[in-house]
Image: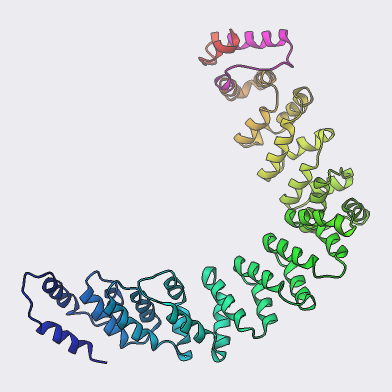
């Protein structure tokens, strides 16, 4: 190949009218290239807007051999100047050998992006690169690269390796455990093309790995590839994943499996010790609308795992008021919110006394947000009745309770409280007026609801 610097000398020797656009670009290129020597500079200059500069950079990169240079050359394969595309293609062809596999693997994202660019016909180049990456002598290198990649690159390499048809089961076992979700999903689909005897062991291994989206696909594929799906379905009905349980409940009647019987049989055995077995039992009970005995519920409510306690609280009904109020003290905010939501569905008459007792014992220990949420479980007039009662009971904390009373007044607009008797409401209104008249509380909203 002609030396880049010989080519530059010829560029310098051209005589064009000084005022022409080409001459101005030539001078600009010569100035930019005067001090460019390092490969980093050539890679940067290969994307310059000046075509003369890009051409010189591609010529210089053609004399090098590095993964970074290959990436730059691939970008120039789609250059808007045909001559630059030709130079880049000639240089690219030198990389299309198994010896250059590390560079091709490094540049794989750029090669894949090239497929969507159409200034030239890149099909032959892409096919040639694919053929090199499928060479038997570099299979181990490509496999190692596949293990560590994610996204489009991982999917491309999986399809490339699968197309080779060499040791398909080993490849699928690797793909089913890959960290890229879409590769695992593609591997499940590929297992469906195998004979049942070959696919079933691979799918059973994949079913034991985490990831509900993949496991649902695995279970669906397994159901049609095992002689007796009943044992598989009985396990799936008690799986910790709601998605797995939903599929199992849908498939169970088709294979004469009774989900209620599966749950009943499990409840006759010992209580589980781990999180996932607990979630399976509690989840299936909720989905089948089955009430668990109190020993089971109490054990689940004492579990170390917040997700188990949350699932147990969801099973508590109206008759479990004490347990729901107790759950308001759970350290997990998610458990607290579930219990709060269930208590909000109960009538005020059932709640007022229990909420008062809860606040009496824990008011000063509760975070502000929880304190307000629990107070709001009571009917509106019972809330202020409680605050006034605490004001009378704790004169040493008068300032604190007056602030709470004033805050309650500020939050009111139109009170709806059919459970507080009329005479009690009147007494509470008068008490608030007296506090305002004495200057102990100040709320412009007081007149809206206290008259």
The answer to which quarter of the image holds residue 373 is: top right
The answer to which quarter of the image holds residue 337 is: top right
The answer to which quarter of the image holds residue 56 is: bottom left
Q: Against 127, is 225 above or below?
A: above
Q: Residue at x 60, y 66 (%)?
A: 182
Q: Residue at x 38, y 79 (%)?
A: 68
Q: Residue 387, position in %: x, y?
A: 65, 21
Q: Residue 382, position in %: x, y?
A: 70, 19
Q: Could you say which is closer to the camera, residue 415 or residue 137?
A: 137
Q: Residue at x 52, y 12 (%)?
A: 439
Q: Is residue 437 visible?
A: yes
Quadrant occupied by the C terminus: top right
Q: Residue at x 75, y 72 (%)?
A: 205
Q: Against 10, is 195 above or below?
A: above
In screen coordinates, is 424 left or right of 322? left
**Residue furthest front in the image:** 121
In screen coordinates, is 198 left or right of 408? right
Q: Against 124, is 399 above or below?
A: above
Q: Specify start and end residues of the magenta stretch as a single range.
A: 408-434
Q: Could you say which is closer to the camera, residue 30 or residue 356?
A: 30
Q: Residue 305, position in %: x, y?
A: 73, 53
Q: Residue 265, position in %: x, y?
A: 92, 55
The answer to if 170 sits in the magenta stretch is no
Q: Is residue 238 visible?
A: no
Q: Could you say which is closer to the camera, residue 277 or residue 105?
A: 105
Secondary structure character of the magenta stretch overall: helix
The answer to if 432 sits in the magenta stretch is yes
């Amino acid at each position: 190949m002609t030396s880049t610097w010989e080519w530059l000398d010829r560029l310098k020797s051209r005589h064009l009218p000084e005022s022409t656009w080409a001459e101005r670009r030539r001078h600009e290129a010569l100035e930019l290239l005067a001090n460019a020597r390092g490969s980093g500079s050539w890679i940067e200059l290969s994307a310059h807007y000046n075509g003369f500069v890009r051409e010189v950079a591609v010529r210089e990169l053609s004399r090098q051999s590095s993964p970074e240079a290959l990436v730059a050359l691939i970008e120039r394969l789609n250059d808007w100047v045909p001559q630059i595309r030709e130079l880049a293609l000639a240089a690219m062809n030198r990389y299309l050998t198994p010896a250059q596999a590390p560079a091709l693997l490094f540049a794989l994202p750029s090669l894949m992006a090239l497929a969507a660019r159409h200034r030239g016909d890149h099909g032959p180049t892409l096919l040639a690169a694919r053929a090199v990456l499928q060479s038997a002598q570099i299979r181990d290198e490509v496999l190692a690269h596949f293990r560590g990649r994610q996204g489009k690159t991982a999917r491309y390499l999986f399809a490339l390796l699968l197309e080779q048809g060499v040791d398909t089961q080993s490849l699928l076992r690797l793909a089913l455990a890959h960290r890229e979700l879409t590769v695992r999903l593609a591997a499940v689909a590929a297992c469906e093309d195998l004979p049942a005897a070959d696919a079933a062991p691979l799918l059973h291994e994949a079913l034991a790995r985490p990831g509900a989206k993949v496991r649902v696909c695995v279970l669906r594929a397994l159901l049609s590839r095992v002689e007796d799906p009943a044992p598989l379905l009985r396990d799936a009905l008690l799986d910790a994943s709601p998605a797995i349980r939903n599929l199992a409940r849908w498939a169970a009647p088709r294979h004469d499996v009774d989900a209620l019987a599966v749950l009943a049989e499990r409840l006759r055995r010992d209580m589980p010790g781990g999180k996932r077995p607990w979630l399976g039992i509690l989840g299936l009970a909720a989905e089948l609308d089955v009430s668990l005995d109190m020993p089971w519920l109490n054990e689940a409510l004492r579990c170390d795992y917040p997700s188990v306690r949350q699932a147990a609280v969801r099973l508590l009904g109206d008759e479990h008021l004490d347990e729901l109020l107790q759950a308001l003290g759970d350290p997990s905010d998610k458990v607290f919110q579930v219990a709060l939501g269930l208590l909000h569905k109960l009538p005020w008459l059932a709640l007022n006394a229990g909420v008062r007792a809860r606040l009496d014992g824990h008011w000063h220990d509760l975070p502000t947000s929880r304190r307000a949420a629990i107070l709001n479980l009571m009917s509106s007039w019972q809330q202020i009745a409680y605050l006034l009662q605490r004001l009378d009971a704790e004169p040493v904390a008068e300032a604190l309770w007056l602030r709470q009373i004033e805050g309650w007044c500020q939050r009111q607009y139109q009170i709806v409280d059919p459970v507080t008797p009329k005479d009690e409401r009147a007494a509470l209104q008068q008490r608030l007026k007296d506090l305002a008249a004495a200057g102990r509380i100040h709320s412009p909203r007081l007149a809206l609801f206290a008259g």
